[in-house]
Image (cartoon, grey):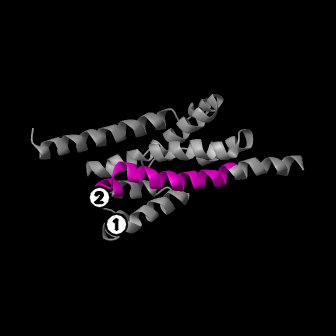
Amino acid sequence: MTAKQRLTLARILALILVIMISIFVYSIRDQAKELAKFGYAGIFLLSMLANATVLLPAPGILFVFAMGAVFDPFWVAIAAGLGAAIGELTGYLAGFSGQGVVENTDYYDRLLHWMDKHKRLSNLALTVLAFIPNPFFDLAGMAAGALKIPVFRFLFFVAIGQILKMMMFAYAGASSLNWFYN
């Protein structure tokens, strides 16, 4: 098998994996809250699953807000942020596969061009886009995968943004208890 054939096969398998993960997570979305009984590991898993869907909504931030009121918000943010970063690998894999659903949209094309032109700023862009609560981060992950940004670099900068975002929601959840008891 040639290198080009192996790359094509890897891209096809990546796309199939992304589709399967998205369908699975979407199908268990109602049972996912059961993971809370497993503490920080459950928070990690739920966050990973919530962020593993590509372009399908899954509730993750509300769960982090609620768990911040129950557990130590710092560790909730770490668990949820790391889980979210790993979950975002599905978008990265979709971009790597070259067969992304939104590959030819104007927003994706501009983001891909910008990230390719400003490779050094792409780290900051991944962090900022992961921090901002928005449903379009999958497009940034797809662009990173299409540009073949090293996966560990992708994970590192996405984890920073996700942890900071989850920290904001976990501490907001923790402080909301004061509203009810003061």
Amino acid residing under circle 1: Lys
Q: Are marks 2 and 1 in contact (CB under 8 Å)?
A: yes
Judging depth in this view, the residue of 177 and 122 nearest the camera is: 122
Residue at figure coordinates x 19%, y 45% from the top left: 7
Give how far across and how far down residue 67 sits, in percent.
68, 41
Residue at figure coordinates x 48%, y 47% from the top left: 85
Q: What crowding class fits label 2: few (fewer than 14 Cα within 10 Å), some (14-19), or many (20 or more)?
A: some
The region drawn magenta spans 144-170
Q: CA distance from mark 2 to mark 1?
A: 10 Å
Q: Is residue 140 left or right of residue 65?
A: left
| Position of the N terminus by quadrant | top left
Q: Is residue 93 left or right of residue 137?
A: left
Where on the picture, by quarter, is residue 143?
bottom left
Q: Is residue 34 left or right of residue 22?
A: right
Count of residue discs? 2
Which label belongs to residue 147?
2
Give how far across and how far down residue 161 sits, in percent.
53, 56
Residue at figure coordinates x 29%, y 55% from the top left: 146
Give how far across and how far down residue 11 sits, in percent.
24, 44
Q: Residue 87 magenta-drawn?
A: no
Where on the picture, by quarter, is residue 44?
top right
Q: Residue 162 magenta-drawn?
A: yes
Residue at figure coordinates x 50%, y 57% from the top left: 130
State which mark lies toward you, 2 or 1: 1
Residue at mark 1 = 119
Amino acid residing under circle 2: Leu
Give how far across and how far down residue 3 sits, in percent.
13, 44
Q: Secondary structure at mark 1?
A: helix
Looking at this view, name the residue that lies furthest to the right.
Answer: 182
Q: Main secondary structure of the magenta part?
A: helix
**Residue 121 in sight in this render:** yes
